Amino acid sequence: MRGKILGLIFLIFITLLAACGDSSEETSAKEETYELDMSVTVGEASTWYKAAEKLAKDVKEKSDGRITINVYPNEQLSGGDSGTAVSQVANGTQDMSYNSTIIYSIMDERLGVVSAPFIFPDLDTAYERLNGEGGEMVNDILRENGVEPLGFAQNGFRQVTNSDKPIKKPEDLEGLKMRIPGINMYTDLWREFGSNPTTMTFSEVFSSLQQGTIDGQENPIDVIHSSQLNEVQDYLTIWDYSFDPIILGINKELFDSMSEEDQQILKESAADANAYQIELAQELEKEQIAELEEKGMEIYELSAEEKQAFREAAKPIYDKYESVWGEELLNAFQSE
């Protein structure tokens, strides 16, 4: 009997020890501190940076200061190279970033489908697809490449600027030296338009336009405005030719190592930051267009008929890239 009692006491002791150990581990996990570095492609005047600052503020408050995020504009962590920034997030040498899906498609060409020419007729359709099956497929691709997605924000539809003439028809693009993002799909597309496309990091664009090395470039209104490209470009054409969401990404290995509580803090704060950025971008766009016009840019918006001519000129891209993007992924995004 005495032996049984001692055995029972020993069992209770071991159980209590294990419980204390679990409690200690749980407390340790909850008290883990993180100092994270996050980069955005553009400057402090952009909606990207403002949303990243909101993210940092909210995460710090919700974690009682345990998780801090240092935000760096203009790709300071990657020497101004957005492609390098994406690679750094994937391999863990950088913690977080706001980067365009276009830049992510350098890492995995399948992601280029989101920015296929004229694939979305409007913003509502774009977000319907991103919030549905297509968006989930994109998230899976990001995870395959070492990045945990924390949602989409909005760089917007990409517009075109140049210093030669207003762009109203495909022929107006012929012969122009245009800076484009460094992915094959855009190179092939702009050659279909008859342009001479060239790639360079965005940090070099202003000086290249100023020096006449290139004639024009294409970017959403917020980037054109916040980068003051009106100082080196005379003409802006609104044609909504390519949608450009931005991904709030964090290194997957880092994210997976965090407690569920900390993961939830990041997810909730990211959702709020993305919603804030999208709302801010949409509110500001009309105001930014008006300011660009006031500062001397000549602005032209294509009619539906004029846009259709560019859509027809871009059709060969779908024939060439369907096998790259994958039929299933393309169908998930393509408008019915």
Image (spheres, rainbow, N blue to C red):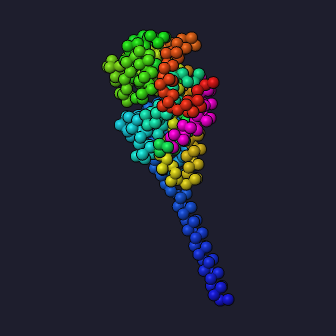
Looking at the picture, does residue 219 appear above or below residue 307? below
Front residue of 36 and 133: 133
- Residue 71, position in %: x, y? 45, 41
Residue shown at 56%/49% (left/top)? 263
Left of 218 or right of it: where is 22? right
Q: Nearer the viewer, residue 29 or 83?
A: 83
Percent x, y of residue 295: 45, 16
Give 315 or 167, whichever is nearer the viewer. Answer: 315
> Residue 206 lies in magenta, yes or no?
no
Q: How far across and down, in percent of the image, does residue 308 sit?
A: 55, 14
Q: Residue furthest bottom?
A: 2
Residue 296 visible here: no
Res 152 → quadrant: top right
Q: Label the magenta part by its dominant secondary structure.
A: helix
From the viewer's perspective, is 164 left or right of 291? Answer: left
Image quarter in which the C terminus is found:
top right
Residue drawn at x 55%, y 68% is 21
The percent position of residue 277, horizontal first and vertical second, equals 55, 33
Residue 98 visible at all: yes
Give the side of residue 284 with respect to residue 71, left or right: right
Counting labels gives 0
Instruction: Please tell me whether residue 141 belongs to the stretch shown in magenta.
Output: yes
Looking at the picture, tell me which residue is in the foreground, 52 or 158.
158
Residue at 49% over, 47% down? 252
Residue situated furthest right in the rendering: 1
Give the magenta-colored segment's residue range: 122-143
- Up/down of 76 relative to 238, above or below: below
Quarter of the rendering occupied by the N terminus: bottom right
- Residue at image position (50%, 53%) is 257
